Structures are given as C-alpha cells and as structure tokens.
C-alpha cells in the first residue's frame, strides 16, 4: 500500500468516526456529546473562531486536494 492510499484511508477513517459520533449525538440528546452543528455554531461566535475555521479549510484544501 502506498503512502497516498494510507493517507486517504486515514482521512476516511477520521470522517467515518466523526459521522458516527454525530449520529450518536443526534440519537441520544442527553448524552452530553454536542452535534457538529452545535460545535460549529460555538466556534463561529467569535472572530477568532471564524479566522481559525478559514485557516482550517485552507489547510485541509492544501493538503487533501493538492497533488
């Protein structure tokens, strides 16, 4: 397995775990786990959070979609 496919597998695993955690948070509202929407709403309240989100998307775009 090449390093490219290992990296893709890592990203897909991370995406699957995040999706599963979000589904669990929606199905068990009293579990204390916030949904992705709640987390993003909390981050986007401040200017620093919005700048961090833009930086995160730029990082992901640069490293995931460039080849």
Image (cartoon, rainbow, N blue to C red):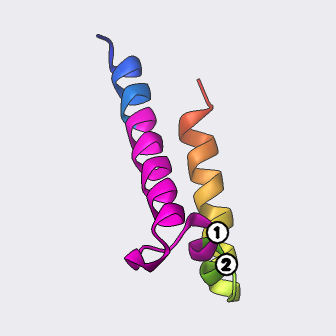
According to the picture, the residue beneath numbered tag 1 turns out to be: 37
Do labels 2 and 1 touch, CB within 8 Å?
yes
- From this viewpoint, which residue is outermost toward the bottom? 46
Q: Residue at x 60, y 75 (%)?
A: 38
According to the picture, the residue beneath numbered tag 2 turns out to be: 41
Side (left or right) of 63 relative to 28: right
Percent across and percent down for residue 11 are: 44, 37
Side (left or right) of 43 relative to 47: left
Task: Please state which of residues 6 and 21 is positioned toward the viewer in this rendering.
Answer: 21
Q: How many marks?
A: 2
**Region rendered in magenta:** 11-39
What crowding class fits label 1: few (fewer than 14 Cα within 10 Å), some (14-19), or many (20 or more)?
A: few
> Is residue 30 shown in magenta?
yes
Disc sitting over residue 27 in the figure: none
Secondary structure of the residue carrying numbered label 1? helix
Residue 21 occupies which quadrant of the picture? Answer: bottom left
Side (left or right) of 6 relative to 64: left
Q: Is residue 23 above or below residue 41?
A: above
- From this viewpoint, which residue is outermost toward the top? 1
Side (left or right) of 37 relative to 5: right
Q: Residue at x 68, y 89 (%)?
A: 46
Q: Is residue 56 above or below residue 45?
A: above
What crowding class fits label 2: few (fewer than 14 Cα within 10 Å), some (14-19), or many (20 or more)?
A: few
Image quarter in which the C terminus is found: top right
Q: Residue at x 57, y 47 (%)?
A: 60
Residue 56 occupies which quadrant of the picture? Answer: bottom right
> Is residue 35 shown in magenta?
yes
Secondary structure of the residue carrying numbered label 2? helix
Q: Residue at x 49, y 74 (%)?
A: 29
Image quarter in which the N terminus is found: top left
């Amino acid at each position: 397995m090449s390093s490219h496919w290992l990296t893709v597998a890592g990203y897909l695993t991370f995406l699957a775990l995040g999706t599963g955690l979000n589904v669990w948070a929606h199905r068990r509202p009293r579990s204390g786990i916030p949904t992705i929407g709640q987390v993003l709403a909390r981050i986007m309240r401040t200017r620093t959070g919005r700048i961090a989100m833009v930086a995160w998307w730029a990082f992901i775009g640069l490293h995931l979609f460039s080849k």
